[in-house]
Image (tube, rainbow, N blue to C red):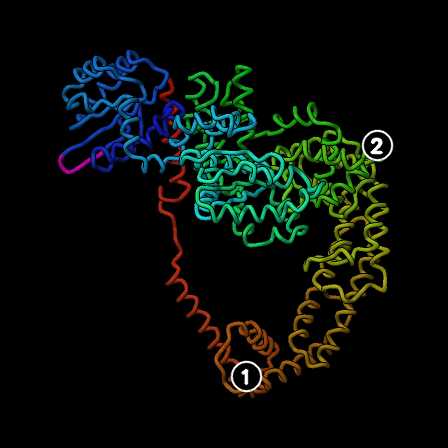
Amino acid sequence: MDSFELGRLTDHDFEVVCRDLFSDVLGIPLEIFPRGRDRGVDLRHTGPARTTVVQCKHWPSATQKTLIRRLIKDELPKVRALAPDRYIVATTVGLTVDGKEELRSAFSTYVRGTGDLYGVDEIVAELLRRPDLVQRHFRLWLSSTAVLQTVLNQDQYLRSSWLRKRLPGVADTFVPHEGFERAQQLLDTQQVCVIAGIPGVGKTTVALMLTAWLIGNGYEVHEITQDVDEIGTLWREGTRQVFLYDDFLGRTTLDTSLNKNEDNRLLSVIRDIRETPGKALVMTTRDYLLEHARLRYDRLVAPDVSDAVSVIRLTDLHRQVRGQILYNHVHHSSLPPDAKRRFADPKVWRPVVQHKHFNPRLVQETLRLSARRGQDIAAAMRKNLDDPRRVWERIVENELTDGAVHMLEVLFTFKSAGLDDLEKSWRSYRKKMDRAADGRTFRRALQLLDGTMISVEQGRVAFHNPSIEDYVRFHLDAGRAHFSELLKALVHEEQVQRLVAAARMADGAGILARLREHESIVSTIVQSMGDDVETRLWREDESRSTHLEWVLETAELLDSAVLAAYVMQETLSPFPHFEPFPHLESLMGSLDASPLVPREHAEQFREQVTDAMHGELLESVAAGDWYWSIALYHQLRRTPSRASREQATESLVQNALEELRRLAAQPEREPHIAHLELLEELVDFLLKQGAKDEMPEEFAVVYGRAERVFALREARRDEWLQKHPIQRDQPGHSDAARDHVLITELMRRLDYTL
């Protein structure tokens, strides 16, 4: 590296670089001191006998005359008030001999000599003497003229203009994060890195930055555009080369196979690169495509590929990273200085960084549009975050194809859908409107939305962020969809449930009105789906009873006599007794409370269920199954009916005494905490029934064991609490508080925008 384009750094980047640089130059640790209009301190070292201050002025577009005038006018009074033992100036403005003499004279009491005045040339010279320091600062590496010249000028290594166009712009706003660091470590140790993740998370950006990192290490960069065989053509022995293969499995779906035998050739190239010093391979793909490809191509499951995969997650963009992203976008935007300075106010930046709808694309688009329209940028940013509809409405209603809009409408009914289910429902929807519903149109719609409004991960499609889903709900509520055709295109019960849930929301009146308008269609769909409900139940908390309870709630919402009649028909005798009794109990309560169900039917169902429970209780008692019997007993106590319980209670006491005798006869063993609840249940029941005196010795034995198990549980709990004390964040020391302080200091630098 022969020089640096320090003007490409933000003032925050420059200050951090100066901290590390001058800590090494001066041989003392420097801290970044909080800025303020009344302090005038950027970097400071306070020792027992002296104080050193380093003033950082990152004004690459300013003239020397402007810099000197501002330093003398604005900073000299502050320096006099601070009275440091030594004052050093570091600036990205070039300083001549005469300029340095003028500054030395003005700051003579605090500047030892012109050697304490570092212009851009002196800073670059010091950096060139410290390559290790430069390597630690990724964005400084990117400012190397050697890197930029390689990217911009060496056409023989960049056969398309894509890298030349993308890399400089991405470098301006890129913020290194945990996902980038994981990929960097992987590439450093294995020389091969496959970057996977959902669209829009930054896979290509990370790949570009990794490529730039290697360029700074003397690598040539080659973009692979067609086939892995290009690597063999471009390979040159003895030359450092990095090969970038973006979207190597395709951009949206595996519509076509890899080129003939390419999976085998790719594996061979990976092994060759790993065994050859000075070679590197960076590939990107959507993670669902990678998983799909692994199912199709056994070789892609090999450790050579699996060990090289680094997934970038949305959680990598934590609060500090968000703050830096916002800062970089504001800093590099075309906003006037006054508009940029507004983001120094925590009331402006905090709602952006902390917002659940935070989205770099949304931030960038807001800045771009506000700059173009001359809007109040702070107000526009808040409005777009509070109501993302303002951003997405223009796109959905004016810019998307009808096929893409219909895909969003169908996706809303799923929330998250498999590609096959989404396509099936989308095709049905389109056909009912007499629109093109072929596979090519589907893929075009998917590609148009992928990465901006939806994400496709491991074969499932979901909204890219909650703000888009919120807008589509508004879109449906406003009556902008073909609701009748959409209802007829639903293929799963969950889709109806999603629409019903949306209708129940405070702002779902429009959806509710349309569901009521098409009540007959909804009723037909729900009844047809109920025919095979047992085959579709997979969660422990779902059953036929829970399904019917939801249908009844929907009937009440839509005032549907048809659905209410369907529920009553399904709850007539004989009703399956193998249903979970808690679910039956909940359904009984819903039938009792429903205005659409006659009271006699609700009472009939209650007696039917309680009789079944009572019968099963008697069978369980007769079989000597104490634990299942007591569970049924408690269930019956919550669902009283005309059925007699006396016989069951008496038999249950005898059952409990038999269990007491069995436990007391067992030899003493190490107590098990897992048994405590069962022991307590038995002891408590006998006490309440006044039966403990029927077997006093046995009761004393079992009661003593329960006491010992209880004591053991408490002792282990105390031991765990001593080893793992509850950490309570002190004021100002939580992660959130530290993040707030760091971002505050970062944003304050916008106060000094020229």
For the residue marked with disc 2, what is the amino acid?
Met
Residue 59 in picture, x, y percent from top left: 34, 19
Neighbour tally class for label 1: few under 14, some 14-19, many 20 plus, Cα within 10 Å:
many
Residue under label 1: 699
The residue closer to the viewer here, 398 or 182, is 182
Query: Residue 43: in sight, yes or no?
Result: yes
For the residue marked with disc 1, what is the amino acid?
Phe
- Mark 2 in CB contact with mark 1 (< 8 angstroms): no
Q: Is residue 18 left or right of residue 661?
A: left
Q: Earlier in the sequence, mark 2 or mark 1?
A: 2
**Quadrant where the image shows the C terminus:** top left
Q: Considering only vertical position in the picture, is 647 above or below 728?
A: below
Q: Is residue 476 left or right of residue 146?
A: right
Residue at the spot 81% in from the left edge and 61% down from the top edge: 605
Count of numbered badges drawn on the protein:
2
Residue at the spot 76% in from the left edge and 54% down from the top edge: 547
Residue under label 2: 433
Instruction: Specify the segment rendered in magenta.
Output: 45-49
Residue at the spot 65% in from the left edge and 78% down from the top edge: 626
Q: Is residue 280 left or right of residue 115?
A: right
Q: Considering only vertical position in the picture, is 188 above or below 90?
A: below
Element class at badge 1: helix
Quarter of the image holding residue 645? bottom right
The residue closer to the viewer here, 167 or 658, is 167
The residue closer to the viewer here, 280 or 569, is 280
